[in-house]
Amino acid sequence: MKNWIKDHKELIVFLLYAGLTFGLLFFHENWRDEAQSWLIARDCTIPELIDAMKYEGHFLVWYLILMPFAKAGFPYFTTNIISWFITCTAVWLLLRKAPFSFDIKLLLIFTFPLLYLYPVISRCYCLIPLAIVLMSIFYKDRKEKPLRYFLSVVFLLNTHVIMAGMVAVVGIDYLAELYGKWKDLSEQEKQKTIVSIAIAVFLMLISIYPLLGCLTTNKEIQTGGNLTVQISQAVFQYPFELFKGLFYIVDLDNILYRFFLIITIIVLCFELRINPLSFFKIYLCILWQCFIYASIISTTFQRTSTVFLIVLFFKWINTYKVLDAKFNVSTFQRTIRKLCLIVLLMINIAGGLIFIMVYEVPGKYSNAYEMAHYVNENLDNNSIILSGPHVEFISGIIPYIERDIKFYHVPGKRYFSYAIWNNENKRNITLQDIKELPTVFHNGEKLYYIFCSVKRHYLNNREENDMIDKLLKENVLEKLYCTQDESLSVENYTIYKVNYNKI
């Protein structure tokens, strides 16, 4: 029995991991970003999907993965199963192929990103660990089999724009290495390499094309501001803020945080001494992300946790080079470095478990499911739900709707399912828009209005609140239901009945 367990320890750990993460799926309520991807995949044709990317700013691959299931009528929960399956595949490959000791691999797969962020929250970020693991596996034979390595790099590019910096770094690194050894290659190897590079470049250009213009088309992206300030923030501010992503503990005590930070610095110093070039590459990958955060999009757990995967890749490929022997690292130094690494991983795991047990399991990630449940139980078929600005928050409800109910964006004067990030999506609703409703709908149609308030978010729109208060006093709106419990996405929904005859 002991021998069987020893021979199958990777399988046992994997089954434990797969079962635990699958169980977490049932405690998670999908929120607006998960709904947005599912609805686009469900309601768009291929040409419409390509056109939508200039607003989304994302690559097509994630939507193409979801599309067959969404269009075939699979339940919304399928999107979470897909992200779980993709992450489990990456974890299995890591367990089987990573050149680390078993104890390190065991700790790695139960870190917060791999335990929760990627398998449970269904977004395109779940593709990143699989792409990183495939790149790491194929790196060793990149000279003999360049095409599969390049395809894994193209795959990484198609996960998220924050990984484009890493794609550039590993691409330049490969070309520099190739330049130094080009004369030693046979003609057949040269041809194979050139063809592989050409295919990779062609696929990258195809991948990037749908995103062209998104910085100006997507009105939610803030690209303005002082460039000098953005660069300063990217170089000095955000890299240190990312350290907090190692811990995932809310309101971390300053003393503990400093202690954890010291351990992190020790690990970084070891890495800098052993392989300064590798350290510089990691920093460039992170610097690209930090510039994106400083100039375009905000940081989130799923985004900042990719730093963990970047470091994983370079640690993985560096094991092929026997760096300890080259730099004369003593047994004592190797032990200290490993202990510090284990401490960091255990801190990450502990912080992740606290987050899961305190916030996800007993609480709610989003109130969208609760509001959708009320709609399914209390509204009739053919009802119409009206929305004000920022329909992405109302879209979070739509995949849960089981009745024949339409959603109408009043400022944009259109029916919708997913959000389109244009000026109409941001335009506020006015009393005049409400007064024009009789010209759009018939007296017999049942109209409802859903308002979403979000703490610490731009959606706290006083004008819309004031309009709702006025309509309540005039009996145009009648409050029916409001979600009360605090959710991780800090969204609260209120639904009102529209008294058509009072408009």
Image (spheres, helix red, strand yellow):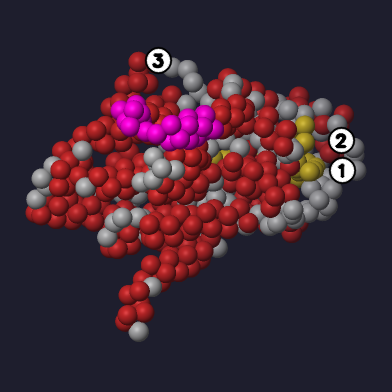
Q: What's under tag 2, amino acid-wise?
A: Phe
Amino acid at dot 3: Asn
Left or right of 24, for residue 341: left
Across and down, in percent, residue 474 comes to 75, 35
In the depicted view, which residue is nearer to us: 199 or 425?
199
Q: CA distance from mark 2 to mark 3?
A: 47 Å
Q: Is residue 240 visible from the viewing direction of this image?
A: no
Residue topped by disc 2? 441
Q: Earlier in the sequence, mark 2 or mark 3?
A: 3
Looking at the image, is mark 2 or mark 3 nearer the viewer?
Answer: 3
Stretch in magenta: 177-201
In this rendering, the answer to whether 217 lies above or below 339 is above
**Label 3's element?**
loop
* Residue 198 shown in magenta: yes
Q: Main secondary structure of the magenta part?
A: helix
Checking the image for residue 445, the label placed there is: 1
Q: Quadrant of residue 80?
A: bottom right
Are circles 1 and 2 on residues that touch, CB within 8 Å? yes
Q: Which residue is mark 3?
A: 226
